[in-house]
Image (spheres, rainbow, N blue to C red):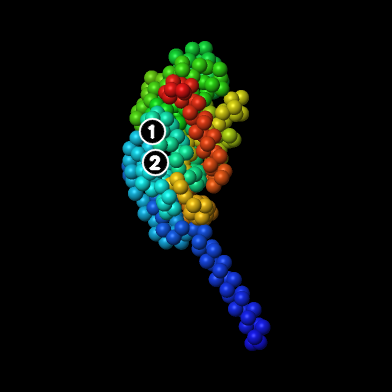
Amino acid sequence: MSIRSHMRSLLVALVVVALAGVATAQNVDSLRIMAPAGPGGGWDGTARAMQAALQDAGIVRQVEVFNVPGAGGTIGLAQLATSEAGNGDILMVMGLVMVGSILTNDAPVGLDQSTPIARLTAEYEVIVVPAASPFQTLADLVAAFQADPGAVAFAGGSAGGIDHILVGLLAEETGVDPTAINYIPYSGGGEALAAILGSQVAAGVSGYSEWAGQIEAGELRVLSISSPERIDGIDAPTMIEQGIDLDIANWRGVVAAPGLSDADRDALVSTVDALVASDQWQAALTSNNWLDAYLGGDEFEAYLANEMTRVTDVLIGIGLVAE
């Protein structure tokens, strides 16, 4: 081999090594994922699915999941914002529920004291009635709602949560005073389901998967789904196609600690980018019936700011949060 050929080969090898080093630097080597709730819930399940996919795909060498339960995730958020500030090896699972919890719990810290990384998954809400209900369409329900808001009781999850927010938004979009809505919160989907099937309320609001069995069995009728367009496999019209300009998703995502360097923030975004692109994560979405709702980096930051404003306005409008 000539000296020139040898030098060319050496240069190519050095470039390959350098590029490999850059690629490695783009992802974190080890990662901690906080689930700001007890084991077994949605945030915990998301964190552990991330852990398995990141490790199985070889994206991150070591991933630890830990739980910090309490106050709708705001205790974990406070820990992230204070004791973890500046640390580039931690992500916290969060979602729309936390946006409301910060306000209703009057939490000492907010999501503005974190670094937005990505929205990962989403589940859209459905409005259902029992099969024997006189309300055949969303228009029927809305007409009764407009005529006498207090007489149309909605069952759903905790006060200030996604179900409650949806009813508040529905009121705003249909000209009903949000403070006049009759929303009955239940601690679990089973209790709300019993109230709906027992005709103790006019309608129920929840994520589709919560009541999929009863919907498919014909015990519940779906009047609408809160997606921007129809969802494959779900026979339900959107609110938008029924003339109500409303869509909202119960989404989950991840944020990092505040005070990160640009390099640390970019490494976390890159790591989650790689996660979402992996076959292992796509399999987790399928097995958990999660919708892929990925928004990364700056796009998620803008989306989160908009969600915080929207949720704040709704909770003020329905009287759960003071101006």
72 sits to left or right of 22: left
Instruction: Using the image, tell me which numbered label, if any, was put on residue 77.
Output: 2
Q: Secondary structure at mark 1?
A: loop
Q: Tell me if residue 161 comes above or below residue 150 in the rendering.
A: below
Q: Camera-side residue: 95 or 222?
A: 95
Q: Secondary structure at mark 2?
A: helix
Quarter of the image holding residue 102? top left
Whether residue 96 is visible, yes or no, is: yes
Q: Mark 1 vs mark 2: which is more N-terminal?
A: 2
244 sits to left or right of 115: right
Instruction: Using the image, tell me which numbered label, if any, was put on residue 107.
Output: 1
Q: Camera-side residue: 298 or 43?
A: 298
- At 44% from the left and 53% from the top, the residue drawn is 88
Name the spot of residue 89 as percent of width and height, x first: 42, 54
Residue reaching furthest to the bottom: 1
Q: Tell me if residue 124 comes above or below residue 40 in the rendering.
A: above
Residues at circles 1 and 2 in contact by the CB criterion of under 8 Å = yes
Quarter of the image holding residue 80? top left
Name the spot of residue 309 as percent of width and height, x first: 52, 31
Total marks in image: 2
Quarter of the image holding residue 2? bottom right
Measure the alpha-carbon separation of dots 1 and 2: 9 Å
Q: Camera-side residue: 121 or 103?
A: 103
Q: Camera-side residue: 173 or 270?
A: 270
Name the spot of residue 109 as percent of width and height, x first: 40, 36
172 sits to left or right of 287: right
Q: Amino acid at mark 1?
A: Ala
- At 42% from the left and 28% from the top, the residue drawn is 160
Q: Amino acid at mark 2?
A: Leu
